[in-house]
Structure formats: structure tokens, C-alpha cells
């Protein structure tokens, strides 16, 4: 089982809990609008019974109804926009997965072509030979450190430093007479000739190390450059650069679609929270209609006005109040359901984010038969497994995916064009299953 196949039911699980949460939020939004409408209807009936001037109330009521109508249209438009964004993301995911398969095929073609290329094989062999010829980096470092330590010790002796600066023992030394005699005496005291011979040996060794490092680096750089050029030529020949560019555009489209979906979801959540502008406008209009007469005051007027017509209006108001109480009970239940759904949704996303880490979803991994993702997900969501236990259980089936390329040294990197880093993009899991959460 490929890593992308392992992830598919995990993504589907997140998608299911997301849908449940969105459905509850939509129901909450509709219940909020119904609650406001019931409040308006009750206010109008009570105002009519009380013999108050209702012309102004009817005007405000119509404005509030218009605000709620526009609210419903805007919410519906947002939901359609979310569906469109999700459809675009699904298409881009499918395209990205197809592009990955094409890139994998192109990389195989490149590897096979280079395996047959005599110049490439020769350059690769020379690179390996150069690597063997060069000194071990740790040994080079130790030799250099030893040279520097010993060279520094020579200059710490003031007598030796004085003679070396004067060029003692070389053709550059021009002193004579008593000074020459004293310099000879000093040279014996500090064993100058033997120490000078040792210092020159160390200086020559340091120079040799520097030269070897520089020349070896230049040769290796030249070979890396040759290998990179030949690789790039083969990549261009099979169109790998165009395929990679196409994948980049698809991934950019997915990121843009994800951002757009998140913005729409944030706006839709405000409808469930009663914080959207249209709801606030309608609520303000209702408050304005009742600003001088609370519901308790209106009921007091009702009790003081006899008449059959008033009794009918009163019965209607009482029925609406009963319906409003029932609705508010339903809203409270929906809020509880929303909280539970949000917790489940977060739990599902936590599992998905964990399993999308390179250690689980990397393209280098696959999963042995017998992995029952459905049961593991069910147990995790039920709380019988922690996130760590679920991940460990899945990890027991993980194994390294076999190399898709011909055997040989093609995993080495050279310059900027090694085959191993040609497809060094994020381990992108495509497919038609997706969600518009923050983890995608």
C-alpha cells in the first residue's frame, strides 16, 4: 500500500466530520433566522392587541424580513462558492497526482538514459575515484590542527622568533662581527637550526594540505558540474522541467483554493454564531420596533383589552411563544452538538496532521498488507486509542519503498542536479479525497 493510499481514509474521515460540523452550523444559522422571525411575529400580534400604532412596526418588520432574505441569499451564495472551491481543489489534486506519476516516469527515463551514457559513466567513475583519492576529511582536519598547534609553539620562544625574523641561517642574513657571534650563541641556546628545520617542514606540510584541498575541490567541482550538465540535458530531453513546472502551478492552485475555502468557511461560521452583518441588521430593526414596549409591557396591555378578535390574536401569540421556546431549546441542543462535532473534527485533524509527517507519508515509504485503517480510525475516534497509539500501530506496517530506479550510484548528488534531488518537493499526497481544513 502506498503512503497516499494509507492517507486516503484518514482524509475521508476528516472530510466526514467536517461535513457534519458544517451541516450543524447551517442548521444553527437557519434556526437563528427563524427565531428572529418568530420574535417579530409575536411583537406584531401583541402590538395589535394592545391597540398600539403598528404602522411603524410593520415598516420595520418589512425591513427586518428583507435583511433576513438577503442573509439567506448571501449564505447560499457562500455555500455554492465553497462547493466550487472544493471542486477546484479536487480537480487540482487529481491533476497533481497524475503529474507526480508522469514525473516518476520521466525520472526513470533519465536514470535509464544516463545508465547507458558512456560519458556520464566515465565522469561518475572519475568522481568516485577522486573521492577515494582525497584524504579523509577528519584526517585532514587533524593534520591541519596539529600543524597550527606546533607552528604557534615555535613563535612563542622570543629568541627563536628574533633569529627567524633576522633570517638567521639563510642568504638573507647580513649581520657580522659581535652581533653575528651573539646570534650564534642565541641559536645554540634555542636549538635554532633543528627547530627551524622542523618549522619549515610543518609550513610545507600546511601548504601541501591547502594545495591538495584546493585542487581536489576544483576537480570535484568540475566533475560535479559535468554530471549536472549531462543530467540536466537528459531531464530537458524528456520534458521533466515542464512537468515540474506544471506540478508547481497545480500545488499553487491547491494552496490558493485552500485559502479561499478557509475564508468562505470563516464567513459561514459567522452565520451560525449570529455575528454576520445581515443578522445584526435584522436584530437591530427588531430591537428598534420594540424599543418603547417590552414583551412584558405588551402582555400587560393584552390582559386589559377585551374582545374576541383580541382573544384570537392572543392565542396566536401564545402559540408562537410556545414554538419559540421549543426552537430555543433546539438551538441550545444544536450548540451542544456543534461543540461535540468541533471536538471530533479537531481530533480527526490531529490524526491526519500526524500521519502527513514525512516519517509516515513520505514518498519513500509504503505499507505492508494487513493494515486495517478503517478499524484504527474508528478506535481512535471512539477514544480507545490515543494519537500516539494509533500512529504506532500504523507505523508497524511501514517499510521502505523499493528503489524505482535501476541499480547503481544514481543516488549520489552532484552540483545542483543530482537525481536524488530532482523530485525533492514536499511529499504531496494527491487524489480526489480532500478537505478544506487548515491541514489539507
Image (cartoon, helix red, strand yellow):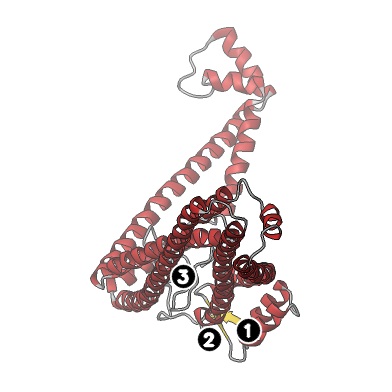
| Image coords of residue 207 (percent x, y) | 48, 40
Q: Which residue is mark 3?
A: 428
- Point out the residue furthest to the right here: 384
Occupied quadrant, residue 122: bottom left
Identified at 68% across, 71% down, the residue is 322
Q: Which residue is mark 1?
A: 397
- Answer yes or no: do the residues labelled 2 and 3 have beta carbons within 8 Å? no
Q: SS at mark 3? A: loop
- Can the viewer see residue 155 in this picture? yes
Q: CA distance from mark 1 to mark 2?
A: 10 Å
Identified at 39% across, 56% down, the residue is 220
Identified at 51% across, 21% down, the residue is 167
The answer to whether residue 126 is left or right of residue 48 is left
Nearer to the camera, 217 or 406:
406
What mark, if any, has residue 33 been given in the picture? none
- Point out the residue furthest to the left here: 237
| Image coords of residue 170 (percent x, y) | 49, 24
Dot 1 surroundings within 10 Å: few (below 14), some, or many (20 or more)? some
Nearer to the camera, 29 or 421:
29
Occupied quadrant, residue 189: top right
The answer to whether residue 183 is left or right of residue 249 is right
Q: Which residue is mark 2?
A: 1
N-term-proximal mark, 1 vs 3 = 1
Q: CA distance from mark 2 to mark 3?
A: 16 Å
| Image coords of residue 21 (percent x, y) | 59, 71
Q: SS at mark 1? A: loop
N-term-proximal mark, 1 vs 2 = 2
N-term-proximal mark, 2 vs 3 = 2
Q: SS at mark 2? A: loop
Occupied quadrant, residue 325: bottom right
Amino acid at each position: 500500500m502506498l503512503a497516499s493510499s494509507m492517507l486516503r481514509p484518514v482524509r475521508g474521515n476528516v472530510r466526514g466530520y467536517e461535513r457534519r460540523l458544517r451541516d450543524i452550523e447551517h442548521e444553527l444559522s437557519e434556526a437563528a433566522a427563524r427565531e428572529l422571525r418568530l420574535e417579530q411575529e409575536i411583537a406584531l400580534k401583541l402590538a395589535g392587541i394592545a391597540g398600539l400604532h403598528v404602522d411603524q412596526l410593520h415598516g420595520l418588520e418589512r425591513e427586518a424580513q428583507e435583511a433576513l432574505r438577503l442573509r439567506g441569499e448571501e449564505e447560499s451564495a457562500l455555500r455554492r462558492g465553497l462547493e466550487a472551491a472544493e471542486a477546484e481543489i479536487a480537480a487540482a489534486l487529481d491533476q497533481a497526482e497524475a503529474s507526480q506519476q508522469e514525473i516518476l516516469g520521466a525520472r526513470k527515463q533519465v536514470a535509464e538514459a544516463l545508465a547507458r551514457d558512456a560519458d556520464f559513466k566515465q565522469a561518475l567513475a572519475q568522481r568516485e575515484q577522486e573521492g577515494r583519492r582525497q584524504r579523509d576529511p577528519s584526517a585532514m582536519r587533524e593534520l591541519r590542527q596539529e600543524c597550527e598547534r606546533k607552528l604557534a609553539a615555535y613563535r612563542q620562544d622570543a629568541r627563536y622568533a628574533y633569529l627567524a625574523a633576522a633570517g638567521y641561517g639563510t642568504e638573507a642574513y647580513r649581520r657580522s662581527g659581535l652581533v653575528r657571534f651573539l646570534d650564534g650563541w642565541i641559536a645554540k641556546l634555542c636549538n635554532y637550526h633543528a627547530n627551524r628545520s622542523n618549522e619549515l617542514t610543518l609550513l610545507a606540510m600546511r601548504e601541501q594540505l591547502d594545495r591538495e584541498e584546493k585542487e581536489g575541490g576544483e576537480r570535484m567541482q568540475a566533475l560535479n558540474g559535468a554530471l549536472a550538465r549531462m543530467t540536466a540535458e537528459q531531464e530537458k530531453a524528456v520534458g521533466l522541467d515542464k512537468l515540474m513546472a506544471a506540478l508547481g502551478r497545480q500545488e499553487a492552485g491547491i494552496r490558493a483554493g485552500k485559502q479561499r475555502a478557509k475564508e468562505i468557511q470563516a464567513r459561514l461560521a459567522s452565520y451560525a454564531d449570529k455575528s454576520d452583518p445581515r443578522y445584526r441588521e435584522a436584530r437591530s430593526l427588531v430591537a428598534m420596533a420594540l424599543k418603547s414596549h417590552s414583551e412584558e409591557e405588551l402582555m400587560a396591555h393584552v390582559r386589559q383589552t377585551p374582545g374576541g378578535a383580541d382573544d384570537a390574536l392572543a392565542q396566536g401569540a401564545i402559540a408562537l411563544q410556545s414554538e419559540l421556546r421549543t426552537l430555543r431549546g433546539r438551538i441550545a441542543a444544536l450548540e451542544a452538538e456543534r461543540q461535540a462535532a468541533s471536538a471530533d473534527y479537531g481530533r480527526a485533524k490531529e490524526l491526519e496532521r500526524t500521519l502527513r509527517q514525512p516519517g509516515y507519508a513520505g514518498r519513500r515509504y509504503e505499507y505492508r498488507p494487513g493494515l486495517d485503517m478503517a478499524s484504527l480510525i474508528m478506535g481512535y475516534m471512539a477514544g480507545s486509542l490515543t494519537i500516539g497509539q494509533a500512529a504506532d500501530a500504523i507505523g508497524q506496517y511501514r517499510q521502505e519503498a523499493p528503489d524505482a530506479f535501476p541499480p547503481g550510484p544514481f543516488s549520489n548528488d552532484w552540483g545542483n542536479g543530482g537525481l536524488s534531488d530532482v523530485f525533492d518537493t514536499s511529499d504531496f499526497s494527491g487524489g480526489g479525497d480532500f478537505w478544506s481544513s487548515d491541514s489539507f
